[in-house]
């Protein structure tokens, strides 16, 4: 065949226990069939990911939840209907179909239905959910373009090109804990779907009081202080650096005086800023600059900005913000 269907090629690889680079609307994933143990092993090996960090499993239809989850509450169903397909991962009790390797020994599994049409088509035509972490080496910046994945893993990995990821940062990871008196939403990783939009979605369909808790590191094992790190230092500042600050930074990172540096300039609209964040970090890292800075100005505040700052702080090597 002269021009094989790339989606079919990906499906053949996945059927044989292989991995593919998969576009999603958040970031690209390194995907393997969730029920192929050799594929799951390859994900951990290729990513150099520690075994304590669980993978999330991607579905294309709500009916697949029953294969993966032990039970599925009304509230989880409300959230799935409100936000799927889309950038929310729901952590729920796993069924015995999901291996302990995927969940790193936890009794829960993260499930997400991506919105990207290529991701959905692959899962649908394969007929099997896909385990997929972000397609980067552990601790490094997530890829938002096919070429980022190719650079990270080389030509041996088959990558489906789905263009630039529209959301640009990883999904919001949440866990619903419900009692007779309230619905508790634990946000394990913030994202563009915010705590208040999650509250609102539940409120419109339930009468119970809702509490949203930002719970980062506690029960999301992959959440170390550093993550998403670009190859050159990223410094968070309140404004363009003074000469003193430049000197401090050069000394801190053992750089010669007058080393070239760049600003990581973010769009004023947090959704647009999220879309470009990782691609810009990569571009600057490859531009010859020795370090970069980002300004945490007062107007860059709000719920989506908080999710962005969560990523930027973890990607940063130094914060020199003046208290104001
Ligand atoms: O947007 C996304 O979520 C992307 C795309 C590819 O879907 N995937 C992604 O996967 O970011 P990964 O593995 O890079 O991040 C998943 C995060 C990890 O921090 C992991 O610790 C957490 O989700 N996680 C997965 N399963 C969990 C579980 N059962 N309980 C708590 N946290 C979990
Ligand atoms: Mg990741």
Image: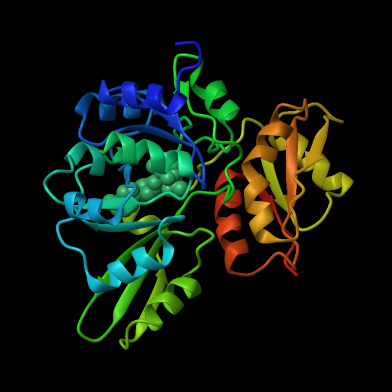
- Seen from the viewer's position, the closer of residues 190 and 250 is 190
Q: Could you tell me which quadrant the C terminus lies in?
A: bottom right
Describe residue 171's horizontal placement relative to residue 98 as left or right: right
- Depicted 26 relative to depicted 19: above or below: below
Describe residue 148's horizontal placement relative to residue 181 as left or right: right
Q: How is the image coloured?
A: rainbow
* Number of dots carrying numbers: 0
Indicate the quadrant where residue 247 lies: top right
- Seen from the viewer's position, the closer of residues 186 and 164 is 164
Look at the image and tell me whether residue 21 can be seen: yes
- Seen from the viewer's position, the closer of residues 106 and 94 is 94
Residue found at the very far left of the displayed protein: 96
Q: Going 18% across and 41% down the picture, which residue do you hit?
A: 100
- Depicted 31 relative to depicted 238: above or below: above
The x and y percentages for residue 203 are 39, 82
Q: Going 14% across and 57% down the picture, which residue do you hit?
A: 70
Indicate the quadrant where residue 207 lies: bottom left
The x and y percentages for residue 188 are 39, 59
Look at the image and tell me whether residue 223 can be seen: no
- Seen from the viewer's position, the closer of residues 144 and 2 is 2
Q: Going 49% across and 28% down the picture, which residue do you hit?
A: 160
- Depicted 196 relative to depicted 119: above or below: below
Q: Could you tell me which quadrant the N terminus lies in?
A: top left
Q: Going 46% across and 24% down the picture, which residue do you hit?
A: 6
The x and y percentages for residue 54 are 30, 43
Residue found at the very far front of the displayed protein: 1
């Amino acid at each position: 065949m002269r021009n094989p269907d790339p989606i079919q090629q990906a499906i053949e690889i996945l059927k044989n226990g292989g991995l593919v680079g998969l576009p999603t609307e958040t970031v690209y994933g390194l995907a393997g069939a969730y029920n192929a143990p050799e594929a799951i092993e390859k994900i951990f090996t290729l990513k150099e990911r520690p075994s304590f960090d669980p993978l999330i499993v991607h579905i294309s239809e709500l009916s697949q939840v029953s294969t993966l989850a032990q039970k599925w509450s009304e509230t989880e169903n409300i959230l799935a209907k409100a936000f799927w397909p889309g950038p929310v991962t729901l952590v729920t009790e796993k069924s015995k179909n999901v291996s302990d390797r995927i969940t790193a020994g936890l009794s829960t599994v993260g499930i997400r239905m991506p919105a990207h049409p290529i991701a959905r088509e692959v899962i649908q035509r394969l007929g099997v959910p896909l385990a997929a972490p972000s397609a980067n080496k552990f601790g490094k910046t997530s890829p938002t373009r096919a070429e980022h994945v190719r650079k990270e893993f080389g030509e041996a990995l088959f990558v489906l090109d789905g263009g630039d990821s529209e959301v640009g940062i990883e999904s919001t990871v949440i866990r619903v804990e419900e009692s007779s008196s309230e619905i508790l939403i634990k946000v394990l990783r913030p994202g563009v779907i915010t705590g208040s939009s999650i509250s609102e979605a539940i409120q419109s369909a339930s009468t119970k009081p809702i509490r949203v808790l930002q719970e980062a590191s506690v029960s999301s094992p992959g959440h170390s202080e550093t993550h998403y790190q670009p190859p050159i230092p990223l410094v968070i500042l309140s404004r363009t650096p003074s000469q003193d600050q430049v000197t401090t930074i050069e000394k801190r990172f053992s750089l010669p005086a007058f080393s070239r540096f760049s600003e990581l300039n973010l769009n004023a609209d947090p959704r647009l800023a999220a879309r470009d964040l990782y691609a810009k970090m990569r571009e600057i890292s490859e531009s010859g600059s020795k370090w970069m800075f980002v300004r945490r100005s007062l107007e860059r505040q709000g719920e989506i900005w908080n999710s962005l700052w969560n990523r930027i702080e973890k990607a940063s090597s130094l914060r020199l913000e003046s208290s104001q």
